Image: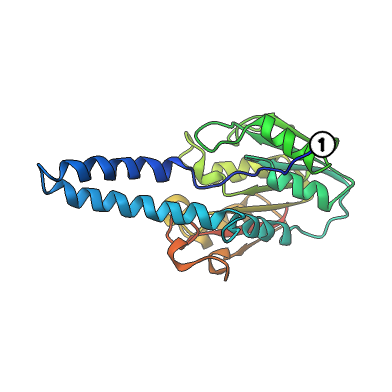
């Protein structure tokens, strides 16, 4: 096992801080000749400051919100003996897959992701983190998308995901992603999905979402409102941040 510390990145991209910050500087400079641009400069400065705080709050050196949100998923895993296969959908830097492997030493875990965009994660980073955490022999990572999982029906004993489905492009109806995720879970297997399920523009009414999942023949499903968690600052409880967060969990 190599030396070093696992790097699980930050859910708030540095671009969200830098881009509005640069715009604020440019517009602020032009305000000398065009005074109204000063108003726009102030707006972009506030945006940059907001995401700078959010990035700090999510990091281990800040309020460690990422780790605490991940713990919410782990706390909702249904009773399971830890024998079998686990799938993490949208594994990013591998944090959830690796933590599950550490908690269940007899499980084999597969993490899938496209690793696209500006999140700073990659398959190589996932593998390095797994090696540093001592679980590389039981965790593997594959490039695949949530809309079409490359696994047979009923392959996994447990499926998990953490704030991924709302980010999947090209799929307008996010319920399709839930259906696809549940397809690869064994009958009687468990699932824990955390996402912005209370964001009505994305998922509609939560009761309707639960009824839809039940209509697929799922044995049991419940919703847990994690947006009320005490570790989430009020300023981060906006719809596109954690203000609409929740967990769908149960058994197929």
Compared to 228, does 221 lie above or below?
above
The front one of 59 and 237 is: 59
Find residue 121 and report its image quarter: top right
Q: Residue at x 56, y 36 (%)?
A: 120
The front one of 95 and 86 is: 95
Residue 77: % across, % down = 75, 57
The residue to which callout 1 is attached is 136
Q: Residue at x 69, y 59 (%)?
A: 71
Task: Answer with left or right where residue 23 lies relative to residue 116.
Answer: left
Q: How is the image coloured?
A: rainbow
Find residue 85 and report its image quarter: top right
Q: Residue at x 10, y 43 (%)?
A: 34
Q: Residue at x 36, y 40 (%)?
A: 19
Helix, strand or loop for disc 1: loop
Quarter of the figure that contains the N terminus: top right
Residue 104: % across, % down = 85, 51
């Amino acid at each position: 096992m190599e030396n070093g510390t696992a790097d699980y990145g930050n859910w708030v991209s540095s671009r969200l801080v830098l881009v509005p910050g640069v715009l604020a500087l440019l517009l602020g400079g032009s305000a000398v000749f065009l005074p109204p641009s000063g108003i726009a400069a102030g707006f972009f400065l506030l945006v940059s400051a907001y995401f700078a705080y959010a990035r700090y709050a999510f990091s281990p050196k800040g309020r460690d919100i990422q780790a605490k949100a991940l713990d919410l998923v782990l706390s909702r895993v249904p009773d399971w003996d830890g024998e079998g296969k686990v799938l993490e959908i949208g594994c990013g830097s591998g944090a959830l897959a690796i933590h599950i492997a550490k908690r269940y030493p007899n499980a084999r875990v597969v993490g899938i992701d496209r690793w696209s965009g500006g999140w700073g994660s990659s398959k190589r980073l996932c593998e390095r983190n797994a090696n540093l955490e001592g679980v590389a022999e039981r965790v593997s990572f594959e490039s695949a998308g949530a809309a079409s999982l490359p696994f047979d029906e009923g392959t996994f004993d447990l499926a998990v995901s953490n704030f991924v489905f709302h980010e999947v492009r090209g799929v307008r109806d996010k319920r399709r992603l839930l259906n696809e995720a549940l397809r690869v879970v064994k009958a009687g297997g468990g699932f824990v999905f955390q996402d912005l399920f209370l964001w009505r523009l994305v998922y509609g009414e939560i009761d309707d979402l639960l009824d839809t999942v039940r209509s697929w023949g799922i044995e049991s499903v419940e919703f847990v409102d994690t947006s009320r968690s005490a570790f989430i600052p009020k300023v981060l409880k906006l719809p596109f941040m954690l203000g609409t967060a929740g967990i769908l969990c149960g058994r197929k």
